[in-house]
Each structure stands twice: as structure tokens, then as C-alpha cells.
Image (cartoon, rainbow, N blue to C red):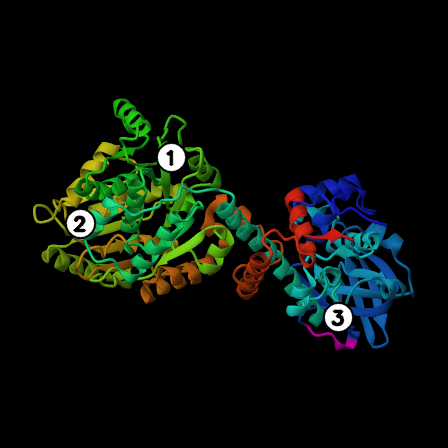
Amino acid sequence: MNTNLQTPIDYLKGVGPNRADLLRKELGIHTYQDLLNLFPNRYLDRTKYYKINQLKRSSAEVQIIGEIINLKEISQKRGKRLVASFQDETGIMELVWFRGQKWIREGIKLNTPYVVFGKTNWFNGKFNMPHPEMELLSEHKKSVRSAMQPIYPSTEKLNNKGITNRVINRIMQQLFLETKGRFVETLPNNILSDLKLISKSEAIFNIHFPKSQGLLAKAQYRLKFEEFFFIQLQLILKNLINKTKIKGFPFEYVGDYFNTFFNEHLPFELTNAQKRVLKEIRADLGSKAQMNRLLQGDVGSGKTIVAFMSILIAIDNDFQACLMAPTEILATQHYNGLLEWCEQVNISIKLLTGSTKTSKRKEIHETLENGELKILIGTHALLEDKVKFKSLGLAIIDEQHRFGVAQRSKLWKKNLSPPHILVMSATPIPRTLAMSVYGDLDISIIDELPPGRKQIKTVHRYDKNRLNVFKFIRDEIAKGRQIYIVYPLIKESEALDFKDLMDGYESISRDFPLPNYQISIVHGKMKPADKEFEMQRFIKGETQIMVATTVIEVGVNVPNASVMIIESAERFGLSQLHQLRGRVGRGPEQSYCILMTSHKLTNDSRTRLETMVRTNDGFEIAEVDLKLRGPGDIMGTQQSGVLNLKIADILKDKDILMNARYYAKKVLNEDPTLIKDKNKPILSTYQSMGKYRNIWNYIS
């Protein structure tokens, strides 16, 4: 008999429409397949049976074999409780029920051997066990239950409606009876024997009913490997398809624009890392395939110049380029930075954001379509249908994690053939996460800072040290430096945050009075024109101190600003702190970052602050951040779908992930279309995944 795993859960014996409805709503279980993929959170060891005289006052979960010799109801303040005397050959204890007494009474057989399981309490000189799990010894011996009892994920609602762990265990047993516990093998024999993996059917059985600790460990390894393997296979295949099916524009030569800029206008010597990355990009652009590359580098590592030189290759081959940033401030900053270089080599460049005036827009649309305009920088405004290019050859996306996949594909459609795509990120992504989320992109990393850049010195100070910090600020201003002071901005408490900012501004104004000191202030409630005015004063050096809410507001490059003070630093995330710190250290002077906090710190806050003080390495910081926050938070909602993992864990199972990626690459290198006989299991699993969007089990 073949059971289809796509059968709705309602049809499983013991479930029925009401339970099915709850399982769907609470745990997302729609089909037999979903139930199989409900993996236990933990296991209880049911191999040991205790005697009553061995019990300890530890409130541990124990199981005992004995008989109920009598039952009585005892009145209490509210209602009654049912108490049973339960004895074995060594002593006597009580079993207690505070609810459901009627049907418990009816079901109990006196003087018959039972196995009871639960937590024990010491009360009035003897042990008792409230609401025990009970099973007749004769039944207990027959059931498929394993020594290790699985505890499944649950919710309050399920428990209240009587769908306890025991019930889930029972319907799981029913599922194994109906499917005869036979599941299609998804991995080829050579991988199974290479890695000494147990079979699919064995793994699925032992994850739900482990015969021993050893078999449970083997089952977990096998299922985690499989989950990672098919995710990696999907991503690597997507990359291969991009390279073979999607023809890119071959940028055949590096011409005058690139060479003139490189030889005559390069503002500084490129680092070895920048040269290496540029080579990787040039190779992509010169091949017949469409480039999909992620360029990672810490704040200040020089991604922009690499992006600009890639744009020059596009223009040398008679194509246009665009750069899309998530906010107007960032887009404007890119525009101002590139404008200077474009003027040196006589290339037209324009900025398009939500606030671009209509007359300006008209001119941009026209020159874009007739090909006069070579580079367009902008925000989401670039994605509007009205924005048409004559020949878009390269699209650069800054801070990709703020753009969903759908937005990326809109850029593709700006041409008959999709342009080359370069994604830039100053938020270093830990390698394991990059492999899982951006596994379809080729990755380039700029991992050294330009020469002459000094490491930023970071210290943590408590509020009581404020006077010393102010003295330090005075000394730095006396040397001609400028200071950022940043306050947190958390949406839920905007009023409080605004008060913090204004209080802070007032106390700084008292300590740094006019006319000796000038202070700029920038926050979200200001009109854009006022913000711009204040920021320009700071950029020009007319004010020495910039008081601001989060730095996205201050996405400006001020080489003379050498001190970043972060107030209530414990309220910022790690990557945010690292991004803020990257706003200083842009000039040749020694720069400092001072993290101010109160004395009350959680363990996580302490870890974040210690990490910031210890290292400037964005990738190390990202690893710690990943451990503290988990993958979903770091990627934001758009990307987290990729990581909808059922059993594997990106952090704990890093080695399994690396292994799975290695084997997925190996398989596809030898057999890109998966047509060899030995890879049949992989192909059919992969095709079914597409059909049901689910990576898992197929019944034989």
C-alpha cells in the first residue's frame, strides 16, 4: 500500500476535523508530510524505572511501576481533588488530579499494574505526582514507544484543548503504522557510504522513536545534512542556471574611461584586496554570463571605488549603469562622492530620489532613454516603470538586505537581457549565513583597510565618568577635531527618545557654551531643509559637535570627525554600533569611539560592548551578532524564508553546512543536470521540492 504524504492531516486515524483544524492553526501542520517534519525539541530518557523508596526530593521526571490500591476525593477551597494511593513493593505514594476527575475515575483499574510518569513533589511527609501520564503495564510493553521519549513543540492552546504531547505521540505512531515506516531515499548511495549516514527510513523512525542515544544522534546528523544539502543544491543550481541560461552582456574590453581614471585620477593606491576583487568582477563582466556578485567589505574598506571602476568598464563598452541605495541620504552621499570622479573623466551622472523635482525628472528620463546620461544614482525611485534606460549594462545595489528579492528582479526587467548585478554590503555577513542566504551569488570580500587608516580606539565608559569624557572632547576640539554624539531612536518610545536627545543637547550646550563652541543638532522631527542646513554646517567645520539620533541621519563622510560618542550604547544592536563607529576614522588622525552606558547591563549587552572594545573586525562582530540574535533577525524578513529550517541550525551545525555545500558542489560539478543513474534520488527529491515547496520525505 502506498500512502501519499500530501494527504490532508484530517484523514489520519485519531485526528478528525477539530484536531486537524487546531494542528493547522497552531503548528502549521496541513499534511502527513508536515506531521513527519514536526521534529521533537528534546527527549526524556524512559529507560529507567524507579522504586518509590529511591525517589529524591528533586522534582525530576521519573517513571514507576505499581498498582492503585484506592481512590478518594478530597474537598479543598475551590472544588475537589482526586487522590489515588499508588504502591510498589518498596512503599506508597499519591497520585493527584485537580481537574478532569470524572473521566479519570471512570478509566482507572484498581489493583492492576500501571506505569506512571511525571514530576514528583514532597508534601505532608510523602511523595505525590500531580497529573501523571499513565499506561497499563500490558499496553506499555506493546507500544512502539522508544526508550527516549520525544517532547514535541506545542502551544498553550493545544494543551488546553487536550492535544498533549502524549496525543501527538499517539498520532505520530498511527502515521508510522499507515506508512509502514517506509520512506523514499533522497540521497545517493555514494554519499550515504562516504559519510556513513543511516537510511532515510531509519533516520525518520529514530528521530521520532529513538531506540538509543547513539541512533538518535545518527538520525539527527543525517536529517540535518539532508536539509542543508538540498538548500545548497538549490542555491548552487540557481547560480549555474544564471551562468549558463542567462546571457549577460560581454564587456569585451577595458577602454579609455577606465584606463584614464586608473592612470591619471586614482586618488590613492588600491589595496591588494581591492585589486583582487576588481579582477574577479572584470572576469565576470568579460564572460558571456550574467554577473551576480556580492561585494562585502567593512565600513571604509573602499567598496565605492571598486564599484565606480566597474561602472567605467560598462561605459567603455557603451552601456549605462545605475546605483540604488536604500535611503535618500545614502543615495545623495554616493552621488556627491562619484560626481567628483565623473567630472575628472567627463561622464554624465544624475541623482533621482523621491524628492527630485518634476522638471529635473523629465530631463533625466529623456537623457536616460537617448543614452546621453551614463550613470543614474537613486533610491527605490529607480524601480518606477517610467525610468527607462537605453542600454542598462550594470546595476549596483547598496545594502542589499534592505531590498527584497522582488525589487532586485525589477531591475532585471529594465532591459531585454538582464544587466550585470553587483550587490554591495557594509554589514559583514558571517560566512555560514552568506552561504545560506546568498549562496546563489558569487562573493567577493575586501578584507583590508586602505593604508594610512588607523584602527579606531574603542572604550566603554559608565555615566559616572561623564566629566572625564567631556574633558577628552574639549582636548580633541582644541586639536581642531569634530565630534558626533548619537542618541538611540527606538520607534516604540519616540517621545522618550526625543526627551533623551533634548536633555542631552541641553547638558552639552551648558558644558560647551557659545561662543567658544558651536553645536549642530539633527533628528527625525526636523524638516529636510533644516536637517540639510545643520549637516552642511558640520561638514564645513562651522560646528564642532553634531548631536543626532541614529546615524542613518548622518550618512555623511566627514574626515575631520574623529570622535563618536554613543549614548545608551546598551540599547543598540552590535551591527548598528559597528556601523556608527565606522562614521569616524575616515581621515588620517587617530579616531575614537566611546560607548556610554548606565551600570545596569544585561549579559547580552555586556557581550556586545566587550566585543566592540575588543575588535574592529566586522566579520568577527557579525559572528557574535549572529550568536546573540539568530539568523532571522540579521537578515530581516525578506530573506528569512530561505532559512525556514526544520531541524538544522546555522550556528550549531556549521560543520554539517560546510560539508553539505561541499557535496552539493561536487555532485553538480560531475553531473550538472542530475541525469546520472546514481543521482536519481536527488533529482526526484529536487523536483518534488519544487512541486510542494518542501524539502523532505517521499514515501516508497
Label 3 Cα neighbours within 10 Å, binned few <14 / some 14-19 / many ≥20? few
Separation of residues labelled 2 and 1 (CA atoms)? 31 Å
Q: Is residue 56 magenta?
A: yes
Dot 3 amino acid type: Lys
Dot 2 amino acid type: His
| Residue visible at 33% across and 59% down in the picture | 276
Above or below 129: residue 547: above
Q: Quadrant of residue 11?
A: top right
Residue 380's disc number = 1
Mark 2 or mark 1: whose residue is earlier in sequence = 2
Observer able to see residue 572: no
Residue 265's disc number = 2
Label 3: which residue? 126
Above or below 59: residue 82: above
Disc 1, SS: helix
Disc 2, SS: helix
Separation of residues labelled 3 and 2 (CA atoms)? 88 Å
Label 2 Cα neighbours within 10 Å, binned few <14 / some 14-19 / many ≥20? few
Q: Is residue 171 magenta?
A: no
Above or below 374: residue 44: below
